[in-house]
Image (cartoon, grey):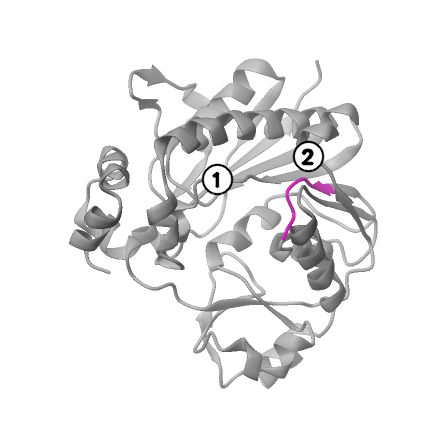
C-alpha cells in the first residue's frame, strides 16, 4: 500500500498520525508487510534442539527475546513444530511485555486480556509451568482460541476465566504480577492487515482510552504491594498510551520503572493536544514501526508501592 492509498482509505487517521509522527520513515514502515517471527516454546522443546530442527527457517534472532526468531516464512501450516506447539507465531515486539514481568516459578500471575494467548503461553514458559496463571478474556469465541493455544503449548498452570477485566478490581492484592495487554485501536497492526486503517475512528480511541484506564486500575488493585504491572498496546495514540499511564500515576501509588532492553525506541510523548503528562512517563517504551522494523508498540512497567 502506498501513502496515497492510506489517505484514501482513512484521511482522518492519516491526519491524526501526522500529529504523532510526520516522518517519511514512519509512513513507509507502517505500510510495509511485517517480518514473520516466532517464539520457541521451551515448555515443549529444548531451545538448542529446536534451533537445530528449524535452522532452515531461521533468519535472525530477535534481540530482546532469547526465544524469539525472525522466520523465512509465515506458512506455518506446513511446519510440524507449529502444530506441536514447539513454536508460536508471534510478532517480535509483542514478545516484550512478558520479559518485563519479573516472572519466576511458583508465583501468581494474571493476564487480564489474554486471548489469543501468545503472551499467556510466554508467561507460562517463563514460570516453567509452576505456580498459577489466570488467563482471562471477555468473549466466548476468544476464550476458545485461548484455551486451544494453551493446550497446544503444553501450559499446565492456567486457570481460564471469562470476565470483563474490570472485575479483577475486586480481588485486592492477589497477584505477584499482572499483564494488561489492552484492547486498542490497533494502528500498529496495519502492517499485518490494512483493515485496521479502514476501521479506525477517533471516537473509538476516546472510548478505548477510558476502558484502558479502567483495566489498568483493576490490574493495580489486584496486584500485591511490591508487585509488577505491565501495560501494553499495539498502537501509537498518546490517549491510549502515555495518558493511560499518566492516569495511573496520578491516582495510584505506583512508580514507572525503566525498560532495559536492546530495543530502539521513539521518545515518549509528554504533551499532546494541550495536555501535559507526568515527567515519569518518559520511562515508558514507545516503539514506532521504523525503529525496529516491527509493529508499533507501547509498554510501561509499573511497580506497586505501599499506600
> Is any part of residue 95 visible from this angle?
yes
Q: Secondary structure at mark 1?
A: loop
Quarter of the view holding residue 129: bottom right
Magenta residues, as a range?
A: 110-115
Closer-to-camera residue (20/13): 13
Packing grade of label 1 (10 A; few <14, some 14-19, many >=20) is many
Answer above or below: position of 243 versus 133.
above
Q: Is residue 40 left or right of 125 when viewed as pictured?
A: left
Quarter of the view holding residue 251: top right
Assess whether residue 9 is covered by the magenta stretch.
no
Image x and y of residue 33, in percent: 34, 64
Q: Earlier in the sequence, mark 1 or mark 2?
A: 2
Residue behind mark 2: 164
Answer above or below: position of 263 versus 274.
below
Instruction: Report the residue at 48% width, 49% height from top.
Output: 261
Instruction: Report the residue at 49% width, 81% height from top.
Output: 57
Image x and y of residue 166, in percent: 67, 29
Q: Is residue 290 left or right of 73 when viewed as pictured?
A: left
Amino acid at each position: 500500500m502506498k501513502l496515497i492509498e492510506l489517505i484514501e482509505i482513512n484521511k482522518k487517521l492519516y491526519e491524526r498520525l501526522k500529529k504523532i509522527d510526520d516522518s517519511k520513515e514512519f509512513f513507509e514502515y507502517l505500510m510495509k508487510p511485517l517480518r514473520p517471527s516466532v517464539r520457541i516454546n521451551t515448555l515443549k522443546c529444548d531451545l538448542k534442539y529446536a534451533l537445530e530442527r528449524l535452522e532452515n527457517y531461521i533468519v535472525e534472532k530477535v534481540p530482546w527475546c532469547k526465544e524469539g526468531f525472525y522466520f523465512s516464512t509465515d506458512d506455518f501450516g506446513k511446519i510440524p513444530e507449529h502444530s506441536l506447539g514447539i513454536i508460536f507465531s508471534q510478532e517480535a515486539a509483542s514478545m516484550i511485555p512478558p520479559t518485563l514481568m519479573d516472572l519466576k516459578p511458583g508465583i501468581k500471575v494474571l493476564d487480564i486480556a489474554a486471548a489469543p494467548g501468545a503472551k499467556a503461553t510466554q508467561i507460562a514458559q517463563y514460570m516453567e509451568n509452576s505456580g498459577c496463571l489466570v488467563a482471562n478474556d471477555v468473549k466466548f469465541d476468544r476464550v476458545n482460541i485461548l484455551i486451544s493455544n494453551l493446550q497446544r503449548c503444553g501450559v499446565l498452570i492456567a486457570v481460564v476465566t471469562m470476565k470483563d477485566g474490570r472485575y479483577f478490581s475486586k480481588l485486592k492484592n492477589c497477584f505477584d504480577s499482572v499483564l494488561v495487554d489492552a484492547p486498542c485501536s490497533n494502528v500498529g497492526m496495519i502492517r499485518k492487515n490494512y483493515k485496521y486503517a479502514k476501521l479506525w475512528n477517533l471516537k473509538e480511541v476516546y472510548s478505548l482510552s477510558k476502558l484502558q484506564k479502567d483495566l489498568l486500575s483493576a490490574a493495580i488493585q489486584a496486584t500485591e504491594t511490591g508487585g509488577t504491572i505491565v501495560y501494553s498496546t499495539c498502537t501509537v495514540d498518546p490517549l491510549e498510551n502515555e495518558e493511560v499511564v499518566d492516569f495511573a500515576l496520578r491516582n495510584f501509588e505506583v512508580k514507572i520503572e525503566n525498560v532495559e532492553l536492546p530495543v530502539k525506541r521513539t521518545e515518549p510523548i509528554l504533551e499532546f493536544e494541550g495536555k501535559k503528562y507526568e515527567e515519569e512517563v518518559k520511562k515508558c517504551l514507545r516503539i514506532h514501526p521504523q525503529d525496529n522494523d516491527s509493529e508499533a508498540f507501547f509498554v510501561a512497567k509499573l511497580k506497586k508501592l505501599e499506600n
